[in-house]
Image (cartoon, helix red, strand yellow):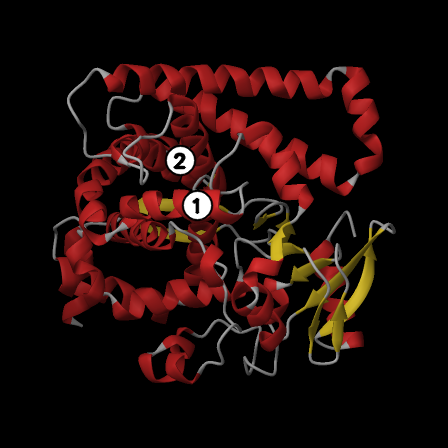
Amino acid sequence: MARNPVQVLSQYTEDFGDTFRFYLGGLKEAIVTTNPAVIQHVLKTNAENYQKSEIQVKRMGHFLGKGLLTTHGEAWRTQRRLIQKGFDRKQLEALSAIMQDSLAESLRDFDKQIQGGPVDIYPHLMKMTFAMVARSLFGARLKDEDIDLVSHTISTVQEFIVKQTIQPYLNPWFEVSGELRRHEAMRARADSILMEYIKQRRGQEPGHDLLQTLMDARYADGEGMSDELVLSESMQLLVAGHETSSNSLSWILYLLSSRPDCLERVRQEFDSALGDAPLSHGALGRLEYTTQVIQEALRLYPPFWMIDRMAVADDRIGEIAIPRGSMVIVYVYGAHHAPRYWPDTESFDPERFTKTNAQQQAPFTYLPFGGGPRGCIGGNYAMLQILMILSDLLRKYDFQLVPGQTIEARPMVILRPKHGIRMTFTQTTARDHHAVMQQ
């Protein structure tokens, strides 16, 4: 289970059906489900009765403070309403320019890296997406070395939280050995760097980034967020946006590398929708097939492979009794791979997401961004970011998968490639593409 929970849970789903009970780590009773009716009940219909589990609130709250990811009830509802504005259409259009500049800078660095032969795309894409998220939050003035330090801190602390969760019996040792203190010190250093930016901003001209949205937000009594809360929310947005898009992009490039037909259709769509222009928010509606490719990649490799909730009071869903305090695991990966809802479930088929097919999908069988009131607040930002990076990479480079490597998914907090994905990139010329188009 500690080595590969997805393998174990998928086997159990096959053996015991779409909803079963088992003991997590041998101690805690959990109900695991891929049943859309149960998922809808837990995440939406009766969402008030299902809070984020103690693991998330306590462990993540310890490192990330009180914010959207780690609060419940009225406090959460208020924060969600205020922060939502940062992800509306108008704000995403304003962010596009910051995102594009950040990407151009990242690609200059990437150009140098690929000269030396094959690269593992995962860390490169993570650097690209994290710089973009960090600059979307804190504006263009965020220094490269600060971005690197905060990114490294988030990765290290996340791995530590996974360890604390999967091997809870080691927690006393983490305290005694100074391991816990070491991670707290790292976090404090990252916090102080970001706090410096927040304090500086209070005295500056307003910017067009998410930090400005957080600072301008007002509660019903006219008060704004304190610097500490702005920091907490910023850190949580960085964590949530840290690995999700880079992870999805890695799997998308991997899937496209084995399907030249799909790759060509995506490139043609970029050519006709964008020409040589960079991607803007307004062009998203014209990228229908590319969006289907992304949706199918998110089905096969959902970044968040499970969502856990804790029942506040006794509940019942049809035949299933859910006692107070029990954990419900919405097994997203299992729902996305259920043969009942996805024929030929393991194959990569973007046609599943044409408008007609998507309308026939049963609700709550596809959850790349969660579902219900606590669904991912940055889903539209993530789609814009993935399309923006993809449009530049595919127009700029040809790429091949290095033969002879084992590609498999490793479920950490996020479903990431276990051994990385090694690829060779070469510059394409616009002429090649137009020649292909003419044929």
Tell me if mark 2 has few (under 14), some (14-19) or many (20+) residues whose alpha carbon lies within 10 angstroms of its own: many
Q: Residue at x 25, y 21 (%)?
A: 141
Q: Is residue 70 above or below residue 198?
A: below
The reply to whether residue 106 is visible in this rendering is no
Q: Which residue is mark 1?
A: 246
Q: Position of residue 223 (x, y in %)?
A: 31, 30
The reply to whether residue 342 is visible in this rendering is yes
Q: Position of residue 225 (x, y in %)?
A: 36, 29
Q: Residue at x 64, y 55 (%)?
A: 309
Q: Which residue is mark 2?
A: 130
Q: Is residue 315 above or below residue 127?
A: below
Q: Position of residue 59 (x, y in %)?
A: 65, 35
201 on left or right of 357: left
Q: Secondary structure at mark 1?
A: helix
Which one is earlier in the sequence, the residue at label 1 or at label 2?
A: 2
Q: Residue extending furthest front? A: 221
9 on left or right of 231: right
Q: Position of residue 245 (x, y in %)?
A: 42, 48
391 on left or right of 29: left
Q: Residue at x 63, y 75 (%)?
A: 35
Amino acid type, label 1: Ser
